[in-house]
Image (spheres, helix red, strand yellow):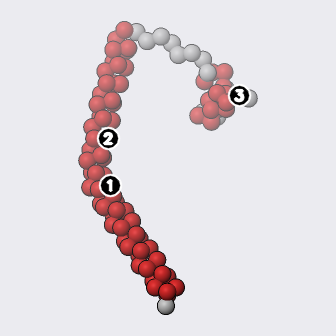
Amino acid sequence: MNTLTAVAWLASPDEPASVLLQAPEPLADGDRALQLLTLLIVAVLVALAVRTVGQAVAPVIELARSFVATSIATLLILAALVVAFVVAVGYA
């Protein structure tokens, strides 16, 4: 069983794979236009959803960036203090 047959069987186990793998019938001109219009509407809706989610997530990303920058600065200061302490103890 090849991958395409397995996927077709998983999609509909009641139908034989040969029926599921048949080529679709060609669309009439009106059906093709309706299909293209539906595809265009779906593409616009997806683009709007991506834009909306992007705008909603932007503040969270900016906050995370700020937090990471603050954390790195804090770790660098702590590392400098540890090095200074080790050097001070070494000279004492």
**Residue at point 41% right, 74% down?**
80
Q: Is residue 81 above or below residue 34?
A: below
Q: Is 75 left or right of 43, judged from the image as shown? A: right
**Residue at point 33% right, 30% down?**
42
Q: Hey, what amino acid is under mark 3?
A: Asn
Q: Which image quadrant for residue 66?
A: bottom left
- Residue 68's x, y, as percent? 37, 62
Q: Secondary structure at mark 1?
A: helix
Q: Hey, what amino acid is under mark 1?
A: Ile
Q: Is residue 22 above or below residue 91?
A: above
Q: Is residue 40 above or below residue 82?
A: above
Q: Where is mark 2, residue-wise?
A: 50
Q: Furthest residue to the right?
A: 1
Q: Nearer the viewer, residue 50 or 25?
A: 50
Q: Where is mark 1, residue-wise?
A: 61
The quarter of the picture where the N terminus appears is top right
- Residue 75's x, y, as percent? 41, 71
Ranked by sequence position, the earlier of labels 3 and 1 is 3
The 10 Å Cα crowd at callout 3, few under 14, some 14 to 19, many 20 or more, is few
Mark whose residue sits in front, 3 or 1: 1
Q: Secondary structure at mark 3?
A: loop
